[in-house]
Image (cartoon, helix red, strand yellow):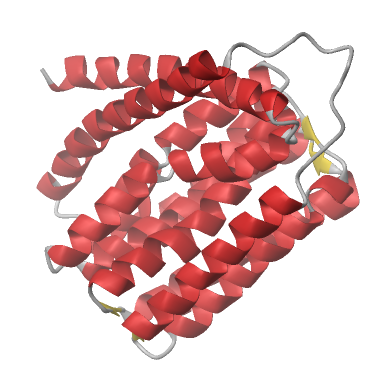
Amino acid sequence: MTYLLFSIGLVALFFGGEYLVRGASNIARHYNLSPMVIGLTIVGFGTSAPELLVSVQAALAGQPAIAIGNVLGSNIANILLILGVSAAIAALMIPLRKVWRDLGFMLLATATIWIMLLDGTVSRLEGVLLAVGLVVFIATAFILGKEEPDIDALPPSSMAIAIAQTIGGLIVLVIGARLLVDSATDIARTFGISEAVIGLTVVAVGTSLPELATSVIAAIRKQTEIAVGNVIGSNIFNVFGILGVTALIAPIPVDPRFASVDMPWVAGSAILLTLFAVLLRGVPRLAGVALIAIYGGYVALMMA
């Protein structure tokens, strides 16, 4: 039965990601927004819905290690695993002028949460500050994200169809991810793996499956901006949105290991992506393979 649920989850991820990319692309064209903005916001935030649900539930259930580990592990997986796999399939080359501002927000979010973790608690006041950061990011993305319409492009589908594709795709993605996360988490616990490691690896990767499916399909469809924007937007939302909302509901006590052991990986992966954008103008295939290898080393260290 477990393998059947796993298979159903994989199928759901594929079809959910396919329709989400189609719907998001049509919304972008309808409003003359760049695909990058849609990837950063609607797609990036939407595919982070599983992380939000898991972190809030974990905080309310008195499992702060899973709540924090889920966010940090997801941010690591988004760059090293998701962008790595996507780039290995199809090089994700994108002009620096389209991503420099958003990379700056991602680095700011990373530095902010690292500072907050150092005192052992993410308080409600800090949750408010994180939520404000999210609002500023969204406003900036939409205000500066307009572009001239492409008169040679095919007309977008009707708005009703685009919205239905986007919402339907997100729902199917979340269901598929849930099926995989539940089974994988149960298996990990039977092997006596700690909650912190489960949050950083099994749960983090599981809740990042929507991002993986979406970015891979976007890469295959040559929607590079959606593939990259999805990851950057998800990382920003994970910090500003998920930890912000979770801390507003209940202050989050923080295990010291997150600031000393895991945040260097979060920061390192964010800096590495920024360097690729600056020096290589994106993530070529070879760089994608390197990211996957680094993620393999990270998981091996966490499981050791």
- Image point (26%, 79%), residue name: 251
- Residue 266 seen: no
Question: Which residue is the extreme one toward the bottom?
Answer: 119
Count of numbered circles on the image: 0
Q: Is residue 74 above or below residue 12?
A: below
Question: What quarter of the picture does the N terminus occupy?
Answer: top left
| 17 vs 299, nearest the viewer | 17
Q: In this view, does 270 lie above or below 212?
A: below
Q: Where is residue 32 in the image (x, y as percent from the top left)?
A: 75, 31
Q: Position of residue 194 (x, y in %)?
A: 21, 61
Relative side of 194 to 229, left or right:
left
Q: Where is residue 267 in the image (x, y as percent from the top left)?
A: 60, 67
| 55 vs 169, nearest the viewer | 169
Task: Say which quarter of the image contains residue 207.
Answer: top left
| 176 vs 296, nearest the viewer | 176
Relative side of 61 to 252, left or right:
left
Q: Where is residue 246 in the image (x, y as percent from the top left)?
A: 30, 66
- Image point (35%, 65%), residue name: 245
| 45 vs 154, nearest the viewer | 154
- Image point (11%, 63%), residue name: 61
- Image point (77%, 51%), residue name: 144
Question: What quarter of the picture does the C terminus occupy?
Answer: bottom left
Q: In this view, does 186 lie above or below 241?
A: above
- Residue 86 seen: yes
